[in-house]
Image (spheres, helix red, strand yellow):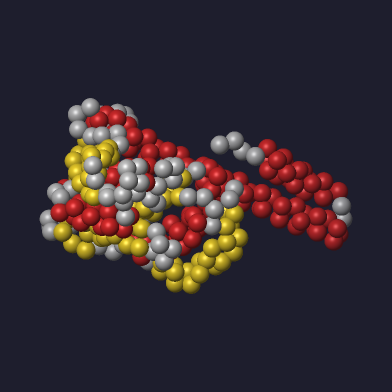
Amino acid sequence: MVWPARSCFTLFRASSTCVEAKELTGDDAQFKVRENWRRIEKKTRTLKGLMRMRIWFLLGLCALALSVSFSQTMADGKYLNRALISQAGQTVHLSANDPRPLAQALDALQREYGWLVNYEDPRYLSKLDLVEVTNPPQQRNSNSEVHYPGGGAFNLDFPNEVAPKSSPDEQTTLQLLVDAYNRSNNPGRFELRKSADQKFDVVGTSAHDVTGNISQQEVLLDLPLTIVERQRSTLKTIDLICLQITERTHTKVTLGVFPMSLQATMVKVGGTKIPARTLLSRTLNATGRKFVWRMFFDPDSKSFFLRCMLAHPS
């Protein structure tokens, strides 16, 4: 990210003017000094904000690079780069193979049919739900170990009785998908939820705990939040949602991967005791573009990374 030249120049001018104010006397000098210190503070806040966004963006890129490199490293031996969909007669076959096969399956359905379905990991805390990779290519430390969800192969056949290239019923198919996944040996258990705006979320609600039992978990995006409704950038609004969840639950949620356009797009979103998921959905809807999100749990840092992605055209 390149620092805005205009902001740096204005900060320099404000500082220079404060020096010039020494030549004034009395109230005029005090007024000019106060005015220009206010300008300095304003521009400093702007630069700090840009620096914070840059750090978060780089963290997101690192998380994405780690995930992509891991998938590429393992693809030859085990995983698929993307889930596959094929149709024979009135039956559609979906084949996924990924540390998060359910998320990979949703990506494939979005590309095939244009369905905008969001996805949220549960917390993967038990070794029963994880795989360990020693010395991944991204880590310089020769003794480093990285953990990933222990997902693998997942297959589903579902009916599509309409004409080829047409979409089957979305809710019926998604419910079949989630139910079949929950019967599989892949990690986590999920619910299909339908929002007020008729969109769907696949929400991780349980996983193995440290004792080896599958237990229900707190779902972070269910948390009611209060945000003052005012005009902000989309990026700042999402950051505010993540910050409030982090402060309330002591589980860090960070916006990782996002289109750079979110920095410039302004939205007006807020409310009192509104579920975080609803606030996030309203924020992305207010951009006028089609988004889906993926909220992934990192077992090593015990934190979540939120990815907001523009939907692929079907």
Q: How many marks?
A: 0
Look at the image and tell me in which quarter the C terminus lies: top left
Seen from the viewer's position, the closer of residues 35 and 102 is 102
| Residue 98 image point, x, y percent | 24, 40
Question: Would you place residue 1 above or below residue 56 in this image?
Answer: above
Give how far across and how far down residue 231 sits, in percent.
60, 60
Residue situated in front as seen by the camera: 240 or 308? 308
Left-right relation of 82 to 239: left
Q: Residue at x 52, y 66 (%)?
A: 270
- Give me the residue at 39% from left, 59% from top: 199
Is residue 120 at least partly visible in the picture? no
Which residue reaches farthest bottom?
Answer: 272
Q: Quadrant of residue 212?
A: bottom left
Q: Position of residue 174 (x, y in %)?
A: 28, 54
Image coords of residue 176 (percent x, y): 23, 55
Identify which residue, 107 or 45, lies in the foreground. 107
Which residue shows up at 17% across the image and 57% down it?
Answer: 209
The part of the image, by quadrant, that contains residue 214 is bottom left
- Left or right: where 40 falls relative to 290: right
Can residue 127 be seen here? The reply is yes
The residue lying at 65 percent from left, 39 percent from top is 4
Q: Nearer the viewer, residue 259 or 245?
A: 259
